[in-house]
Image: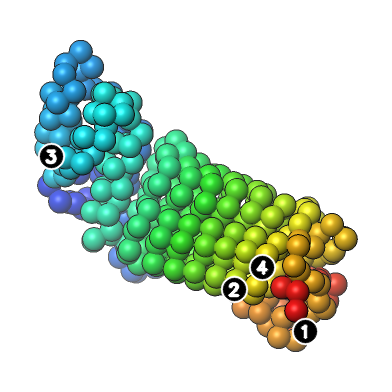
Amino acid sequence: MVFAIRILKIKKIFMMSITYALIINLKMKKITRIDIKEIFELCKEMDKSKKFSEQFNALNKKLDSLYGIQLSEQVMLYSRDKYHQVTDVPHIFIRIANTLIKEAAKDSEVIKIENPSALYNLCAGLNADISVLVRGDVGSFFASTVKCGEYHISGNAGRSLLANATAGKCVVEGDADEGAGYCNQGANILIKGNSRPRTGIQMRAGNIITLESLVFGSGLYMAGGNILCLGEKIGKGLGPGMVGGNIYVPYLKEETLGIGTQSSELSSEDYKCIENMLLIFNENLGIEKISDSKFKINGKEYDFQGYKKIIAKK
């Protein structure tokens, strides 16, 4: 394995977000580092004793000199009317962060985001076939409406993870808050920790796998796609109002079924569906097929013959 490091230049200076390139297995990968903490500190440098317009203009001047970007008049007006300052405004933080991310995505293959501080809307609307590695917790609506790309979160995820995403792949090492995969239209999501209520709400396509739990209201108004739970924590009222799609769980109790749903035994087609879901995350789960219904996942054997399927009542 060969490693080579060289400094990359992104737009004008990008001094805070120093970028690197690594040759891994003889393949060059451009890696950009973006530290959200540095954005916070930059904003806090502005003099609060000055008028808002002077603060905002000073911030824009600093952003232009460091990164070659500027915040729009719309951001200025919103921040002025709601916050009256620029030093501690989440709306400004996220606008700067997402602008840097989109600029970096133009000529990087990997973006590393550090100290995300649960900032909401990170990577929202990103349309780039790249890998985004986040070290820490992300806030609500992370990577919402994305159309491609791979995302790996080392911590927890806030509400509505990958909301309205049409494609892409996301792995969450920790827990995912309420509504993960909201209105999913084709993305693939793996939650290694616990999922919160209404996971996969209004899901239309794609796949969601949870390793620990699937709780109240998950699959609410589901119209397509698949949800698979490998853990033993199964909540009440799964799939209420669903009209399509499949929810696979290790067992059923009377209270497990949501309004308008019914249970079904798994068929050979379901086993194949589960296999295809698992293989999407083979690198993360270490899948080993034993038989059509049996798999080793991270060294633990699972027999899906004992699983149940929740579908819309016919």
In the image, 64 versus 248, the foreground residue is 248
In the image, 138 versus 33, the foreground residue is 138
First in sequence: mark 3 vs mark 1: 3
Q: Residues within 10 Å of mark 4 (few under 14, many from 20)?
A: many
Amino acid type of the residue tagged 2 in the rendering: Gly
x then y, percent, for residue 156: 56, 44
Judged by depth in the image, the label closer to the viewer, 2 or 3, is 2
Q: Residues within 10 Å of mark 2 (few under 14, many from 20)?
A: many
In the image, 264 versus 214, the foreground residue is 264
Q: Is residue 286 left or right of residue 157?
A: right
Judged by depth in the image, the label closer to the viewer, 1 or 2, is 2
Residue that carries the numbered disc 1 in the rendered image: 267
Element assignment for label 4: loop
Residue that carries the numbered disc 4 in the rendered image: 242
x then y, percent, for residue 100: 26, 47
Between the C-alphas of marks 4 and 1, the distance is 20 Å
Judged by depth in the image, the label closer to the viewer, 4 or 1, is 4
Q: Are marks 3 and 4 in contact (CB under 8 Å)?
A: no
Q: Residue furthest right?
A: 254
Quadrant where the C terminus is found in the figure: bottom right
